[in-house]
Image (cartoon, rainbow, N blue to C red):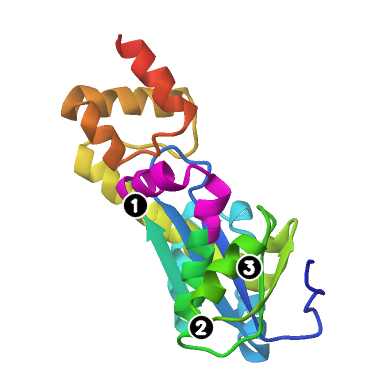
């Protein structure tokens, strides 16, 4: 059963992820604790869904959000992501594991009874992982959860970490790794293989995407 909306409860944790639809780069999940004071400060900063903010502005805003709000950021790099996906074989379960880990880390530092995340699957997936660790929290999953400022703040932290790590990976392989999944992404994947060999692809990309088959088919 989905929990009642905690609109009348100011203290809450917002959770969001970045990189789920990007072939290259990590999957990042962020959790942000918000109370009455920080909610006002985030509003003054014009915090909103990261999809509505430029990458440059996201990278500027993230350090300020980290300064004023207790937070937790979990980054699952491509290599670890591929290992986990091979075991779990389900993106929603992998997301639930990441959400629970981010929540668990933040609950080590703050006391909070309510959390909000975007709707991506059965909330029991997250709650079961937390309960294994002895954590109890009322979790509400909403469609368009980023309309809540706590979730919007988490979306900015997750995207900023994703962008920084994607840039770092680009530097490591000497090829610009584009966001998303597109013909430009396929071209970059072929460049990585050409420069470093097929095995290196798993260090920068989420291999279960259809992009992998498309790229490898072009090589045969």
Residue 77, numbered circle? 1
In the image, is 99 to the left or to the right of 148? left
User: Whole-Å distance between the Cαs marked 3 and 1?
Assistant: 22 Å
- What is the quadrant of residue 2 in the picture? bottom right
Q: Earlier in the sequence, mark 2 or mark 3?
A: 2
Q: Secondary structure at mark 2?
A: helix
Labels 2, 3: front one: 2
Residue stretch in magenta:
79-96
Residue identifier under label 2? 107
First in sequence: mark 1 vs mark 2: 1
The residues tagged by marks 1 and 2 sit, at their Cα atoms, a distance apart of 23 Å
Tell whether position 94 is magenta. yes
Q: Position of residue 181 (x, y in %)?
A: 49, 32
- Percent of width and height locating residue 190: 30, 22
Depicted 202 relative to depicted 51: above or below: above
Residue at the far left in the pictured view: 196
Label 1 crowd bin: few (<14), some (14–19), many (20+), radius 10 Å = many
Which residue is painted at 54% across and 53% down in the image? 93
Would residue 195 be seen by someone viewing this image from the given angle? Answer: yes
């Amino acid at each position: 059963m989905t929990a009642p909306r905690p609109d009348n409860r100011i203290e809450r944790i917002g959770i969001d992820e970045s990189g789920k639809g990007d072939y290259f780069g990590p999957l990042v999940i962020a959790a942000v604790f918000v109370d009455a004071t920080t909610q006002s400060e985030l509003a003054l900063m014009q915090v909103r869904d990261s999809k509505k903010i430029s990458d440059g502005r996201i990278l500027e805003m993230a350090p300020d959000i980290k300064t004023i709000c207790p937070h937790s950021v979990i980054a699952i790099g491509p290599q670890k992501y591929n290992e986990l996906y091979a075991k779990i074989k389900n993106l929603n379960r992998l997301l639930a594991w990441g959400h629970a880990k981010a929540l668990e880390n933040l609950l080590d530092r703050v006391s909070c009874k309510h959390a909000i995340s975007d709707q991506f699957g059965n909330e029991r997936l997250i709650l079961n992982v937390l309960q294994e660790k002895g954590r109890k929290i009322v979790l509400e999953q909403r469609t368009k959860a980023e309309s809540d400022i706590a979730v919007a703040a988490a979306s900015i932290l997750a995207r900023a970490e994703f962008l920084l790590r994607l840039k770092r990976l680009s530097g490591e392989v000497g090829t610009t790794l584009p966001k998303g999944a597109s013909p430009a992404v396929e071209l970059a994947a072929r460049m990585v293989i050409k420069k470093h060999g097929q095995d290196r692809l798993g260090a920068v990309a989420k291999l279960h995407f259809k992009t992998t088959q498309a790229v490898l088919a072009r090589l045969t």
